[in-house]
Image (cartoon, rainbow, N blue to C red):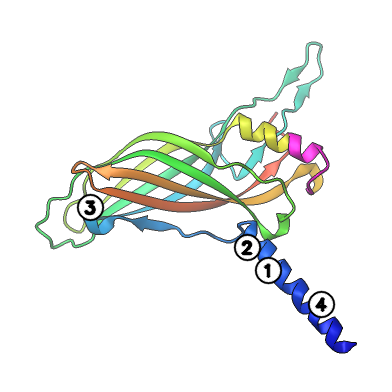
Amino acid sequence: MKEKYLLLFTVYCLLFTVILCGCGEGPGSPGSSGSENTGVKVDASVEGLYLGQPTYSVDAFRGICDEGPPPEYEDFTDHQATVTFTARLLNPNSTFQAGKLYIEKYTVEFRRKPDSISAPPIEFYPGFASIVIHAPTGAGEVTVTTDIRFVDLIRKDQYAEDVLSGRYSSWLAYINNYTAIFTFEGKNEYGEEFTVKTQMDFQIGNFDNC
């Protein structure tokens, strides 16, 4: 009998591990690739931005600030992120002339945090950008900061619909926690491809922005 319970417990643990992996939890793999071709190492960092203010909270429900009449609603739009790219030469002593870097598109993948494993999945976001990073020289660095779209209205509305359906779990005010993994793709002026990854934790739910 003890052996039977031990076997069942082992199977349960294995199934739970598979579920965790299948849900895509984890920190992701920040960094860059293609540096060996471009001669430039690019790193990135990111923070959330909404209505001109830094925030890691994504509001998915439009609230009423004043019932009126007529009612006055809170501002409700896409959420953005501020990304900072830092570029430096792989070999500061090289005589190789590195070319400008051009980032043309990016994707955002949303992974549920362990404390929100039963939260609604959020569909990945494909974005387009026009970002130019000038080639660094010597031991110097080049820094470029820009704002990009992060969670659009379509994904916010879908999240609200999913949570209200009762098919998924959430905390008070329909809040759940996610990690957003950003992957930027581009080329240098010689056509050599490269990618840059970074990530950010955030929460999504019902927040007061009146």
Q: Amino acid at mark 2?
A: Cys
Badge 3 or badge 2: first in the primary sequence: 2
Q: Nearer the viewer, mark 2 or mark 4?
A: 4
Viewport quadrant of the N terminus: bottom right
Determine which quarter of the picture holds residue 130.
top left
* Residue extending furthest toward the right: 1
The residue stretch that appears in magenta: 161-170
Q: Amino acid at mark 1?
A: Thr
Task: Tell me how many marks there are.
Answer: 4
Is residue 171 placed above or below 29 in the rendered structure? Answer: above
Q: Quick check: can you spot residue 207?
A: no
Q: Residue at position x 78%, y 11% from top?
A: 70
Q: Which residue is mark 1?
A: 17
Residues under numbered marks 4 and 1 in contact, where contact means CB atoms less than 8 Å apart? no
Q: Secondary structure at mark 2?
A: helix
Badge 2 or badge 4: first in the primary sequence: 4
- Alpha-carbon distance for marks 2 and 4? 20 Å
Residues under numbered marks 1 and 2 in contact, where contact means CB atoms less than 8 Å apart? yes
Badge 1 or badge 3: first in the primary sequence: 1
Q: Which mark is residue 8?
A: 4
Q: Quick check: can you spot residue 83?
A: yes
- Alpha-carbon distance for marks 1 and 2? 6 Å
Q: Nearer the viewer, mark 3 or mark 4?
A: 4
Q: Which residue is mark 2?
A: 21
Q: Nearer the viewer, mark 3 or mark 2?
A: 2
Q: Amino acid at mark 4?
A: Leu
Q: Amino acid at mark 3?
A: Thr
Q: Nearer the viewer, mark 1 or mark 3?
A: 1
Magenta stretch containing residue 126, yes or no? no
Label 2 CA crowd tier, 10 Å (few <14, some 14–19, many 20+): few
- Alpha-carbon distance for marks 3 and 2? 34 Å
Q: Which residue is mark 3?
A: 38
